[in-house]
Amino acid sequence: MQSYNPEAIRNIAIAGHQGVGKTSLVEGLLYVAGAIDRLGRVDDGTATTDFDPDETARHISVNVALAPVEWRGRKLNLIDTPGYADFVGEVISGIRVADAALLVISAAGGVEVGTEIAWDLARERDLPRGVLINKLDRENADFRRALTSVQETLGAECVPCQLPIGAEADFRGVVDLVRGVAVIGRGPEAEVEDIPAELADEAAAARELLIERAAEADDELMERYFDQGSLSNEEIVAGLRAGIREGTLVPVFCAAGGTGIGATALLDALADLMPSPMDAGAADAEGNALPVSADAPAAALVFKTLSDPYVGRLTYFRVFSGKLQSSGEACNVNRQETERLAQLSTMQGKETESQAEISAGDLGAVAKLTNTHTGDTLTDKDHPVRLAGIDFPAPVYSLAVVAASKADEDKLGPALGRLVDEDPSFAFHREAQTGETIISGQGETHLNVAVERMKRLGASVVTQPVQVQYHETIRKSVRVQGRHKKQTGGRGQFGDCWVKFEPLPRGAGYEFVNKIVGGTIPRQYIPAVDKGIQENLARGPLAGYPVVDLRATCDDGSFHAVDSSEMAFKLAGGLAFRKAMEAADPILLEPIVVAEITVPDEYMGDVMSDLNAKRGQILGMEPLGGAQLIRAQVPQAEMMTYAIDLRSIARGRGKFKLEFSHYQEVPAHLAQAIISQAKKEQEDG
């Protein structure tokens, strides 16, 4: 594939809800443009951009993938992103390196939540957008109903640039409103014809509206439109490009991606109307402009890391300024290391094509970088510059994993490290209190895919729910004696202490106070009493959870000149603790989190009802223009699967974050069930 100047490149993220045909659309565009000679199918596992084993097995996209297309002297880098909400991190990666987004919707379903999420992500970056109404050849497809859904949900700036010819099984082409012609036929066999007579009036009205919107984008064009009453095709394109670039206009296209109907007209539109890297510009992390030129110092952003079974670790990047060269070097400014760039490539799905260099505005990949990760900047070592990284969402759903066998244990750590390297929206940690290894991600499917990947990396695991970190404490003050005495024929063991145990406020932890006077316990033995108590704090009497928020005051005791020792007093301290816990009215504490939940107004009542059912306490609400931010305190035990619950309640349109707040007493009727379950698990080993 030849090298292109920045003005001839179009970097377009293909995004939308799952099942709307994004990957099939990309496949069709590749085929029409001659980039592939055989049309693959998602259902058969042969689609170019769905090559990961999890994608072919599940028939969904889980990774961002590249599909460059050469069309009429331009290079269109199509960035195929997943539609399933669990893989939103991949969508964020794709949008970060795109200059425009094409939001795909189904002609039968209209705008769905995945499209709204992608739209919001693109809007946050002020990314120019277009909309494609896809699957017009399917049953129940209705272009006009779908267009109404687009304009009502996404905004009135969404204006048709194409109209469908026929519907459902009779869909056979599109009207190109920019050129005022019809493009009829499948794939590369499509031909340009006159607009059918039955659509002439509708097409004329729609074209007139399009010309008006194009003229509004430029003062000079507006004057010309008023003077002449119309614009030339070239002027319409110039006006549309300006409106799209400024975000005042969103073009709406139509096609049937799976069959290739409308593919040539869509490629023409993307090449003509979507912004180039020159239009988009480039800037460093501080907002300083960078030249979009191959002659400038290099600055490239890593947006994806992937392990390929044949070439090893692949690093995907976009060059924003300058160029990277094969067999050259680049400085990773995030890690202050120099990386050797072996062979640069362009990617078409999993297929690589070697390139001597990747220049400003283009996307590429390089294998076997040592210490470069997603979000890092590769730059000229003599002119270091850092690009803004990628903000991935925090994990919202967790599971505990246990190695399936002894052989898997040694491979578990490296496998988890590889997954974090490939997917920054995935995380893991070791929980000190429970000893669990916990994996976290964006949802159930995300973690199921992670478990399958771990298996392919040689680490089979069993998943189980994460244990809630309960604590125990006391409600009464008691003073008890801990006395350890043992005689075995030789030197004996003797330690005797009196300790007062009293509750402390929540969050105070553990406190030991020495009030020994008169040497009733020698000074060197007092720390042993403290140590004996602390060793027993780890397992409380109710359910074996850590004991917190109490003060232990050692105020009396006795010793033996020969038989006393640190060990004897440590055992005495432990005995005092266990005796006190029986008499001090122990209770169970549970962690409470503050939940911040953002949902559209229409789901607020359902969300609040669900929080009340989860023993939540509403702290407040804040309107956010069509949505509500709800703050509530909720027991953590009730929120372990909230990612799944909220997705069901709000139809995928809600988001939330949790932050630990404090511990509080578990209601008695629930505490007994928790204690019984814990004791049963202890008995079962």
Image (cartoon, rainbow, N blue to C red):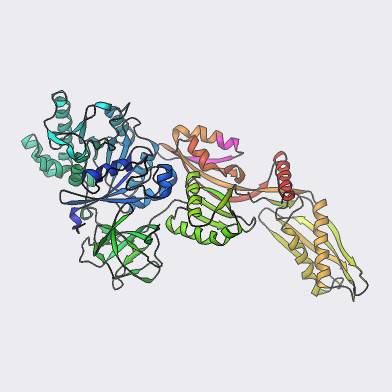
Query: Along the line of sight, which residue is nearer the eye, 605 or 396?
Result: 396
In percent of width and height, residue 155 lies at 30, 36
In percent of width and height, residue 492 lies at 90, 72
At a point 18% along the width and 30% down the height, the residue shown is 206
Query: Along the line of sight, which residue is nearer the eye, 13 or 196?
Result: 196
For the record, the magenta segment spans 610-621
In percent of width and height, residue 537 lies at 73, 58
Q: Would you say residue 24 is visible in this rendering?
A: yes
Residue 293: name its quadrant. Answer: bottom left
At a point 70% along the width and 55% down the height, the residue shown is 546
In percent of width and height, residue 626 lies at 40, 36
Q: Would you say residue 180 is visible in this rendering?
A: no
Residue 612 lies in the magenta stretch: yes
Residue at the far left: name it: 228
The N terminus, quarter of image: bottom left
In the displayed structure, does residue 165 sit left or right of residue 194? right
In the displayed structure, does residue 402 sit left or right of residue 64? right
In the displayed structure, does residue 210 sit left or right of residue 485? left
